[in-house]
Every structure is written in C-alpha cells, then in structure tokens.
Image (cartoon, rainbow, N blue to C red):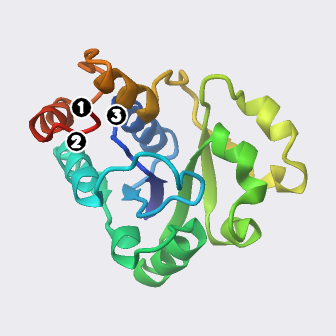
Amino acid sequence: MKICLFGGTFNPIHNGHLYIAQMALEQYRLGKVIFIPAYIPPHKRNKNIIDPKDRMHMIRCSIKGNNAFTLSDIEIVRGGTSYSVDTLRSMKKIISENDELFFLMGTDSMADFHSWHQSQEIVKLCKIISYERPGCLYNETLAGMGTLKKYFSRSIKGFPIAVSSSDIRKRIKNNINIKYIVPEKAEKYIKQKGLYL
C-alpha cells in the first residue's frame, strides 16, 4: 500500500487541507493519507496553538466518512518538539515492509527544508509529494533547492488554496464568518468551545 503522512499543526484544520489530501490520494493512487497533528511544531513555537485534544477532535470529525483518511496521535503521544524525521522512523517500524511511504509538503515548507531537523535523513525514509502554496510557486522553489531538488519531483496538479489556519484564526478573532473555509463540524466545534477568540 502507498501510505502518505500529512503532518502539520492543523490549528485549525480547513478545507484546503482536505482538498490537498484528496488530490494527493487520487493523483498518486495512495491507499491511505494519515493526518498527523504536531505537538510542538519546530517552526511555530511562538504561535497561538490550541490544545492537541481540540485539534485532534476537529481533524477526526472532518475526515469522518472518507475511508482513505485516518488520524494518528503519534506526535501528540511522543510529546516534545515534533520532528518529522522521528515520526517517519516510527512509522517505518509500524507499516509493512511492502508498504511505500510518502510525505506531503507545501512549497513554503520546501523553501525552508534545508533548515529542517535531519532533512537529509527525511528524504531517505520517504518519497515527498509537494503542493503549491499561494505566493510560493513550485518551479521557482524547486530551482533553489540545490542537491535536494531530485527528491521533490512529485507535485500535485491543482489550484493552490489561498487559505491558511492563521487567516482563519484572525477571522474568528475579528468575528468574521469562516463558513465554507472550515469543515462544518469543525466550525461548529470552534463555536461551541469558543476557540481562537
């Protein structure tokens, strides 16, 4: 089976995340996409990140009904800083030796990949699928990756989604509607719990 890890803060999950995961699933004939919320993301230490249980709940209710989407609490349980290389190593021990491991990454992360913890090990553990983020074009990002360029040959064909979790948090704080940007069940949960106010 082709298994793809989709890591992130998911603070909160939004429809862009779901669209990207579905495009990867279809275009690369993946068997499974595993959403993996970070406990403490290395590049977002000072951000307003809500409790992992709340982020987990929103992912769980948002992916319900899609049998190819699953959720893992591997980084939450491990605690500490969530390094992708540690997660990939752990997943390699869990999956079958016949399974193929992929990792989903935005072009904004591609641009910073050289600074990731043990980035040279990451590319040995999986195949990377990238997706374009607004303002960070795939071809331009790829051109500046030097020797790492060969590991980023897979890219999702589709429209870049001009939505981000930080924009959603700002909208909530300013009492602006988030309908159709966030999955309906996640939106309801945010309102019920008074998150991001």
Do the residues bearing badges 3 and 2 touch, measured as CB atoms within 8 Å?
A: no
Do the residues bearing badges 3 and 1 touch, measured as CB atoms within 8 Å?
A: yes
The answer to whether residue 153 is visible is: no
For residue 104, the mark is: none
Disc 3 marks a residue whose amino acid type is His
The structure residue drawn at horizontal position 68% and vertical position 68%, both measured from the top left corner, is: 117
The structure residue drawn at horizontal position 41% and vertical position 31%, both measured from the top left corner, is: 16
Disc 2 marks a residue whose amino acid type is Ser
Q: Circle 1 is placed at which residue position?
A: 183
Distance of mark 3 from mark 2, alpha carbons?
9 Å
- Dividing the picture into quadrants, the one containing residue 20 is top left
Q: Residue 194: where, in percent of width, then height?
A: 16, 37
For residue 14, the mark is: 3
Q: Circle 2 is placed at which residue position?
A: 62
Q: Residue 2: where, in percent of width, then height?
A: 47, 60
Q: Is residue 186 left or right of residue 118?
A: left
**Nearer-N-terminus badge (3/2):** 3
Question: Residue farthest to the bottom?
Answer: 93
Do the residues bearing badges 1 and 2 touch, measured as CB atoms within 8 Å?
A: yes
Q: Is residue 115 above or below residue 59?
A: below
**Nearer-N-terminus badge (3/1):** 3
